[in-house]
Amino acid sequence: MFSKKIVAGAALMALAAAASAQVKVYGYLDLGVGSFEGAGGDSTTQVANGNLMTSFLGFSGSEDLGGGLKAEFVLETFIGADNGSYLANNASTTGFWGRGSNIALSGDFGKVAIGQYDTPLFVAGLAYNPFGSSMLLSPTMRHYYGLSIGVAATGRTLSTDTGWVNSLTYETPNLSGFTATVQWSPKESSTDGAKDSFTIGAAYNAGPLSLMGVYADHGVTDANAAYLAEQKVFSLNASYDFGVAKGFFQYTDVDNDDTNLDDTLFQIGATIPVTPQGNVMVSYGQLKRDEVDLKNKIFSLGYDHSLSKRTGVYVAFTSERATDLDTGNSFVAGIRHSF
């Protein structure tokens, strides 16, 4: 009898621990087949990973510390689902957990996180265009990060990646629709010219209207390869849900301190529900670099159809035109699944 009571007590303690400390395994897989052609390049047929969003695997957890305070963690890695590889970030040395790796405390005061954390500029970039974080179909993501087809014409415009490594981030609570994020990454170097990076983003959401502004001052350091050049970036973003369609607008100005080249970008787009399960997405974006008389224009059109809450299929077309180069047209059809 005594041993049974011990076992029962241990089981109750284990259940209590599980209730207070929750860990989730989750992810997203996106694979498609298509014909891909960059501006001025040759066309290739590929089985392609991450067309609507890059495939990834994640682990997250939280622990209730009492008094409204929680401890949280995130570990996420990009997956090359087409060949079973993991994908390192384009501009950093973050390695396996390149999508996110941080620990945080949250409560009524908001949230404070340490580690690699999404930047407000990336969050605004994906939230205010119909194709989200797609590095193939979103003109904004293509122009920001240069990770997909055809980008040799202009290169990436941002000197940092989607998430800042070695960063400290504070997010405010929601104050009547207003939220803000402040992020700082130290230079971690004594080299002359090395500089901290700093960014602030502020958003307002009220019914169908959403607005977000971001200012970023990118430093440069030899401590890692995540901060490549000195830049000052300003971005304005807006969306409005009209019911029959949701419209998007983005404007970004990038001032490159090292090269004295300035980039201006804009994007307009819409998501149009055509059935309860299906949406048409359309987006046009342009990058302009006056000093070298260069323009890069991208148009994307797609249809995404949900088969369930977690699974869907899609078809999409994207066309890119760069100064003095031929137009590159790409087409892809695929399937996505979240878990």
Image (cartoon, rainbow, N blue to C red):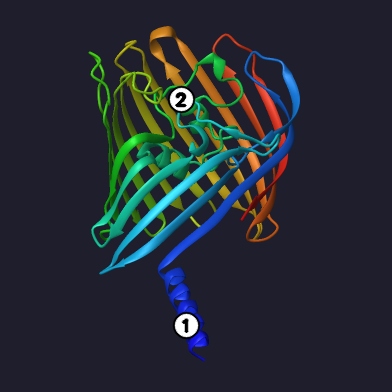
Q: In this image, 131 relative to 318: left or right?
A: left
Image point (60%, 32%), residue name: 136
Mark closest to the chain's N terminus, 1 or 2: 1
Where, by quadrant of the figure, is residue 62 drawn?
A: bottom left
222 in relation to 77, above or below? above
Image point (67%, 55%), residue name: 311
Q: In this image, 47 relative to 28: left or right?
A: right
Image point (42%, 37%), residue name: 122
User: Label for residue 6?
Assistant: 1
Whether residue 177 appears in this view of the structure is no
Whether residue 86 appears in this view of the structure is yes
Q: How many C-alpha atoms fall within 10 Å of the one at disc 1: few (<14), some, or many (≥20)?
A: few
Q: Secondary structure at mark 1?
A: helix
Q: Nearer the viewer, residue 72 or 155?
A: 72
Q: Secondary structure at mark 2?
A: loop
Q: Position of residue 276 (x, y in %)?
A: 64, 61
Q: Nearer the viewer, mark 1 or mark 2?
A: 1
Where, by quadrant of the figure, is residue 310 drawn?
A: bottom right
User: Label for residue 91?
Assistant: 2
Q: Nearer the viewer, residue 107 or 251?
A: 107
- Quadrant holding the C terminus: bottom right
152 in relation to 102, above or below? above
Q: CA distance from mark 1 to mark 2?
A: 54 Å
Q: Amino acid at mark 1?
A: Ile
Q: Amino acid at mark 2?
A: Ala
